[in-house]
Image: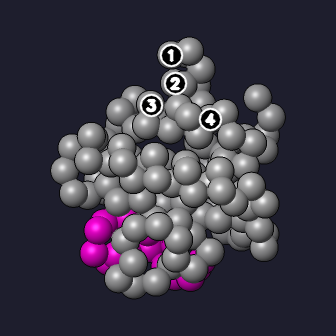
Amino acid sequence: MSDKQVTPEFITHLEENEVFVFGSNLAGMHGGGAARMAYEVFGAEWGVGVGPTGQCYAIPTMQGGIETIRPYADEFISYAKQHPQKRFLVTRIGCGIAGFTDEEMAPLFREAAQEQNITLPQEWRQIIDMQL
């Protein structure tokens, strides 16, 4: 696994072709955690809780159980495949304010682990590798 496939633990700057992928709520109220960083630093728009926004991509995680997140994760992976010129830095979506564990979230991104333009948190890479 190359370093390019692992999301840095702390992201403070994005290159022009990079996209900050964060967990949000459906209302797009980016008040805390990575969502706040997305809003304050990377241009995520207030009120946009799903999909591309600023230099970011929002995946909602606050609307229910883990299975309610799966369609949004799948939609993101499809979007990333359609934009191979971009590099998507996926944060530990759902593992902060939403209260999910890495073990719950990582499997939703198993397909993303195969994509060259998607980076995943180290914790998720290890979980996915163990499940293969």
Mark 2 or mark 3, whichever is nearer to me: 3
Q: Which residue is mark 4?
A: 113
Q: Which residue is mark 3?
A: 107
- Mark sitting earlier along the chain (2/4): 4
- Mark sitting earlier along the chain (3/4): 3
| Residue 33 covered by magenta stretch | yes
Q: Is residue 111 left or right of residue 36?
A: right
Q: Position of residue 87 (x, y in %)?
A: 72, 57
Determine which of the numbered discs, if any, sits on residue 127 in the image: 2
Cβ atoms under marks 3 and 1 closer than 8 Å: yes
Cβ atoms under marks 2 and 1 closer than 8 Å: yes
Q: Position of residue 55 (x, y in %)?
A: 62, 74
Label 1: which secondary element: helix
Q: Which amino acid type is shown beneath numbered disc 2? A: Ile
Residue under the image location 68 percent in, 40 percent down: 115
Q: Which amino acid type is shown beneath numbered disc 4? A: Ala
Give the CA separation, mark 2 to mark 1.
6 Å
What stretch of residues is rendered in magenta?
23-43
